[in-house]
Amino acid sequence: MLQPQSAANYIRTNLEVLANDIQPMEQIELHRKTSEMVYSTLTNKALLAHKLKNSLNNTSAQLELEKASSLAKDNRIKSLEEIIIELGHDPKYPKGIQELIKKKEDDIAALRRQLKLPITMHPQTTYIVEKKL
C-alpha cells in the first residue's frame, strides 16, 4: 500500500452527522475540541497581527529616518555647493571648513528637533552636542 507523500494525496470528504445521534459525553468532548481549535486559530491570528503591526511600525520609523537622512544629505550638498562657490574652488580655506562644520552641526540639531532624538555624544568629537531642541 502506498503512503501519502503530500496533502494533495489525501481525499477530502464532507461528513454530516445529526447532533441527536451523538452521545452527550461525545458532544461535550466535540465542543471542547472545537473550542480548542477555534482558540488556537484566534491566538495564532492575533499573534500574527501583532507581529505585522510591529513590523509596520518599524518600517514606518525606518522610512522617517531615511527621509530625514535624505533631507540632510540634500541640505549638505546645497551648503557644500554654496561654500565651494563662495570660496572660489579652494577647499583648503579654513573659513570654509569652519562654515561647513557649523552647517553640519546645525543640520544635526535640526534633524534631532525633527525626530525628537535625545542629546548624545557627537560621533567625531568628545564633547556633548547640546543645541536647544
Image: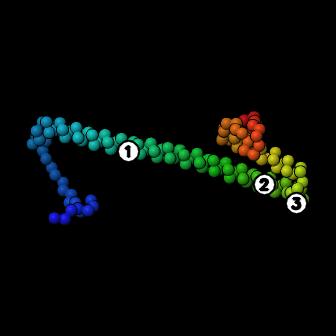
Determine if residue 113 is in view. Answer: no
> Which residue carries the number 2 mark?
78
Element type at marker 3?
Answer: loop
Q: Position of residue 41 (x, y in %)?
A: 32, 44
- When asked about the image quadrant of residue 50, the answer is top left
Tell whether label 2 touches label 3 (CB within 8 Å): no
Q: What is the C-alpha distance between the residues marked 3 and 2?
A: 15 Å
Q: Residue furthest bottom?
A: 2
> Which residue carries the number 1 mark?
45
Q: Residue furthest front?
A: 126
Element type at marker 1?
Answer: helix
Tell whether 24 sits left or right of 104.
left
Residue in the picture at 53% in, 44% down:
57
Q: Position of residue 111 (x, y in %)?
A: 70, 43
Tell whether label 1 touches label 2 (CB within 8 Å): no
Tell whether 22 sits left or right of 94.
left
- The disc, 3 or 2, on the residue closer to the chain's N-terminal end is 2
Tell whether 41 sits left or right of 126.
left
Q: What is the C-alpha distance between the residues marked 2 and 1?
A: 49 Å
Give the residue type that dot 1 points to.
Answer: Lys
- The disc, 2 or 1, on the residue closer to the chain's N-terminal end is 1
- The disc, 3 or 1, on the residue closer to the chain's N-terminal end is 1
Q: Position of residue 66 (x, y in %)?
A: 63, 50
Q: Nearer the viewer, mark 3 or mark 2?
A: 3
- When asked about the image quadrant of residue 92, the answer is bottom right
- When asked about the image quadrant of residue 27, the answer is top left
Q: Position of residue 115 (x, y in %)?
A: 66, 41
Using the image, determine if residue 73 lies above or below residue 32: below
> Which residue carries the number 3 mark?
89
Residue in the picture at 75% in, 37% down:
128
Seen from the viewer's position, the closer of residues 57 and 10 is 10
In the rendered image, which quarter contains the N terminus? bottom left
